Image (cartoon, coloured by chain):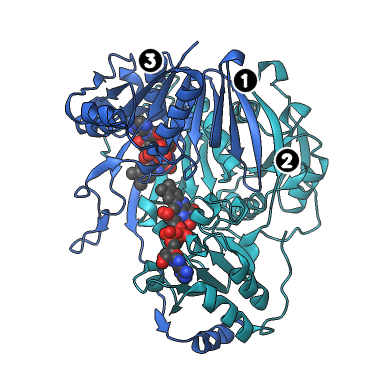
Chain colours: A cyan, B blue
Amino acid sequence: MSDEGEGEGDGEEHENGVVDVDEYEDVWVFIEEHDGEVMSVSWELLAEARTLADELGDDLVALAIGEGLDDVAEQALERGADRVLVADDPVFEPYRADPYGEQFRAIVEERKPSIVLIGGTHTGRDFAGRVAVPAHAGLTADVTELGVDEDGLLEARRPAFGGNVLATILCEEHRPQMATIRPGVFEAADPDGEADGEIVEVDVVVEDDDCVSEVLEREVGDTADITEADRIVAVGHGIDGDLEPARQLADALDAEIAASRAAVDEGWVDGARQVGQTGKTVRPELYVAVGISGAVQHLEGMNKSETVVAINNDPNAPIFEHADYGIVADLFDACPDLAEELEGVTEPQEVVQ
Amino acid sequence: MSWTIVVGVKQVPDADEVGIDPDTGRLDRASAPAVMNGPDREALEAAFRIRDQAGGEVIAMSMGPPNATSVLEEAVAMGCDDAVLVSDRAFGGSDTWPTSLTLARTAEALDADVVVCGEETTDSSTGQVPPGIAAHNDWAQLTYAEAVDARPDENRLVARRDVEGGHEVVAADLPVVVAAAYGEFEPRPAPLHRKIYGENDFEPTVWDAEDLEIKDEVGLEVSPTSVGGMETVDPVERKGEVVDDVDDLAESIEEVVA
Ligand SMILES: Cc1cc2nc3c(=O)[nH]c(=O)nc-3n(C[C@H](O)[C@H](O)[C@H](O)COP(=O)(O)OP(=O)(O)OC[C@H]3O[C@@H](n4cnc5c(N)ncnc54)[C@H](O)[C@@H]3O)c2cc1C
Ligand SMILES: Cc1cc2nc3c(=O)[nH]c(=O)nc-3n(C[C@H](O)[C@H](O)[C@H](O)COP(=O)(O)OP(=O)(O)OC[C@H]3O[C@@H](n4cnc5c(N)ncnc54)[C@H](O)[C@@H]3O)c2cc1C
């Protein structure tokens, strides 16, 4: 990209969506909830955004959209928000892109935040563009690192080209500076019990009659949070539909089951347990990859693991180059054997659901 | 009743060939062959399934340099009825805002009832273009679609969506933008006559920014984001010890978890 931008920032004559950036302040975090259940990435972002807001001398504002949000708003205050904006209405339950996007856009245009962070979940990635496009905001995708430069500009870093590069994305003349952030890359802070910020009810601007979509059915499946697990046994396409050997190993290690995208796409494991570029980022002390080849998109999600173990029957599988310990073996033999040897080596860990 | 189904197809550097230049240590994407973005093959398959159900035409669109013609030829070879290349130097430096504007205007010009995209690309992988198209046109959207069910009599498209930790079935009014969940739409074998036609005789329609009346709304100038820098990522250092028997492996694991 060249740098021949003209920066038409002065006076009233703003072209191309360029705005007076000084009119925008505060750091916003979107609190994603479904049926009162908050996605953990929202609390991860709130903790990270507290640091950003302090650095910038801005307020930290949480934004929740849904129905019956009193508890959620209270929790956001206990977790450090200076203010919580809530758009509370039955039209928002269950989630749909069009009413969410429209409501979020209206609040952004009215209140002019400088930074808006949204969890990079399917929901967050679904509606973020419906805010950024009409607001002509910059929207950085799938961020894994955040910082501010000497001018207070947000530096959002994100992997690209299958994780081979880390690109720094800037948004200089448009506001807000929006970003979706990968689940699991930041750590949530514990609530401190104090909730002395204010809760502000915003005007609801959408009506059901204006909506262009309708949820006909919704089934909640497995909502396990693998990002907090200390030990993980992850299965890949090599298990061929049979989870039993991996389960035995996971039981012996008191580990959570996770999976590659290939295993998720086959329907063997639920999507909530997918590790990688389009799944979660995990950081366990032990990550055992069973029948996983080690594609870049998978490695991206497991790279923060302390120790990686690979079980694969192909000596040339790339996963061995990204593992601390490996064994070239049939997983259907190696997993039960290993499970037997390791029985009882760990203290039971808390089950995260 | 028949639908116009437009599919976004992007040309990207072959993911398996994008390497690190050993001399400069920088990402070398210029020398990688340009290919069709993998997830877009599945978008095409999703579009063909909608065509099977509702009838109508599937038209591929690509915004890219003149040589992106090759991915459109491939799309036609796979079974598209027609294809449009949207190409203009003015598009240079576009982020997802003007990219989705350009594709939104193209879809409008083609009178699309449905736009089908891939989940995300293998190069910049933002996944923002499909919702961006929907937002620019104020259309409905169905992302992470695992199955599609066209209902021409209701003028709606229904999709089963993966919502992480569950599924939902959502009906959307036309026009609608669908992003096909990667891994859910195995492309069908190409019919031989299309293959021959696409590879030998087909030429796409070419439109530029003027044709779409968006000359002043595209490119670097209107892009809110810019790439400030790119660093290559060093692989995480790992021990790489491969053992022969389970006992040794168990011992190493015990040291870690004990
Ligand atoms: C845009 C995009 C996003 C993606 N996002 C993700 C992501 O988030 N996460 C992700 O994981 N992938 C992702 N992928 C897919 C990724 O590129 C790979 O296709 C996927 O990771 C492969 O999964 P796998 O290793 O389980 O399967 P395979 O690559 O098929 O590997 C199976 C392995 O099992 C071994 N095996 C087979 N049988 C046995 C046996 N009996 N005993 C021992 N070993 C055996 C084989 O040797 C092989 O190495 C993405 C791809 C794209 C294009
Ligand atoms: C390293 C890097 C990082 C970047 N990060 C950002 C960022 O965070 N935010 C931002 O706004 N821009 C970003 N950009 C710019 C962005 O890459 C371009 O706007 C790009 O043309 C579209 O985004 P995508 O490839 O991510 O598409 P995605 O949204 O991932 O594509 C999804 C689907 O949309 C369709 N589609 C996408 N592009 C086309 C096309 N040209 N023609 C036809 N169909 C298409 C395809 O069906 C595709 O499967 C980045 C660029 C680079 C080089």
Which amino acid, by three-letter code, is at mark 1?
Val
SS of the residue under disc 1: loop
Q: How many marks?
A: 3
Residue situated in front as seen by the camera: A150 or A157: A157
Q: Which residue is mark 1?
A: A212
Q: Position of residue A225 (x, y in %)?
A: 66, 58
Q: Chain of mark 2?
A: A
Instruction: Work out whether residue A200 can be spotted.
Output: yes
Q: Tag 2's secondary structure?
A: strand
**Residue A156 shows in the view:** no
**Mark 2 highlights which residue?**
A84
| Residue A232, position as x, y percentages in the image | 59, 69
* Residue with the mark numbered 3: B110
Circles 3 and 1 on the same chain:
no
Q: Residue A325: percent from the left, percent from the top?
A: 46, 80
Q: Disc 3: which chain?
A: B
